[in-house]
Image: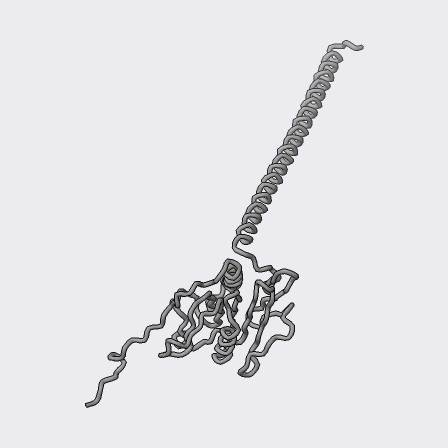
Amino acid sequence: MTQDISPSNQEEIIYPETDGMPMAENTKQFKWIVLIKENLEILFASNSEVFVAGDLFWYPVEGDNTTRLAPDIMVVFGCKKGDRGSYQQWNENNIVPQVVFEILSPGNRPKEMENKFLFYQKYGVEEYYIFNPDKNELAGYVIQGNKLEKIPEINGWISPRLGIRFELKEDTLEIFTPSGEKFLTPLELSQERKIEQQRAELERQRAELEYQRAESEYSRAETEKQRAETERQEKEQALAELEAEKQRYQALMEELKARGIDF
């Protein structure tokens, strides 16, 4: 007897969306995950074909729900934006996430990080960045052939895929967009937005004052013009009256001469 194992009768494979572990172990790690993820979202906001995710399970092999990792941040070019419970590669035109970030915390163990490195290398990640905020240490790897090779000088490095620049300062990491704008925390972005709003309001008030000043100058010029016109008309009227008086005088003199009266 042959057992029917058609797809309709196979047990559906479940791809869990969470492992029950927290996204971050502490506030510092969480801050950096949010900082990088949100700024990358902003950087590629206008490109509908760039998907950015944080702490999302990536399943590279269809039918295998145990081979998976949830990078702290991953960026996928050629993949539409949108909500997903997990990144199932076979449902995304088999596009491998090109860039991943891991933010270290005290709970990360060397073996765990080694396994992550091997996973990302095996499944074709192009760029892999690891940042330890407690030690202010950044390491980066780029694909060479089928291996992830360490970037020899990470300070000042520009990501080939993202175009962002990494600058290691004495006590922190700074990341800059291709146009030179620094990655900011949500609080810094909010403060900057308020500053921009205040600057815009000041510009509006300045423009309003300039408009009022221009209006005042125009009114003053119109008043001067009207005064000059009034004076011109008054002068013309005085000259006309003087000319009329002169003509009356001449007419009177002619009349007196006609009567034989001479002076």
Give residue 157's position: percent from left, percent from top.
63, 70
Q: Quadrant of residue 230?
A: top right
- Identify the image quadrant of the N terminus: bottom left
Residue sitting at 40 percent across and 69 percent down? 86
Depth check, front residue: 6 or 221: 6
For this orientation, the residue located farthest to the right is 263
- The color scheme shown is one colour
Q: Position of residue 183 (x, y in %)?
A: 57, 60
For the question of whether residue 191 can be seen, the reply is: yes
- 59 or 92: nearer the eye? 59
Residue at 76% in and 10% down:
260
In the shown orientation, is residue 156 left or right of residue 117? right
- From the viewer's perspective, tell me whether residue 232 is left or right of residue 114: right
Q: Quadrant of the C terminus?
A: top right
Residue 93 seen in the current view: no
Q: Nearer the viewer, residue 91 or 226?
A: 91
Q: Position of residue 84 (x, y in %)?
A: 39, 67
- Which residue is most to the left? 1
Up-down relation of residue 91 to residue 219 (above or below): below
Q: Residue at x 54, y 74 (%)?
A: 127
The count of marks equals 0
Q: Nearer the viewer, residue 189 or 151?
A: 151
- Residue pushed farthest bottom? 1
For image coordinates 60% across by 37% down, the residue present is: 212
In the displayed structure, would residue 45 be above or below residue 5? Answer: above
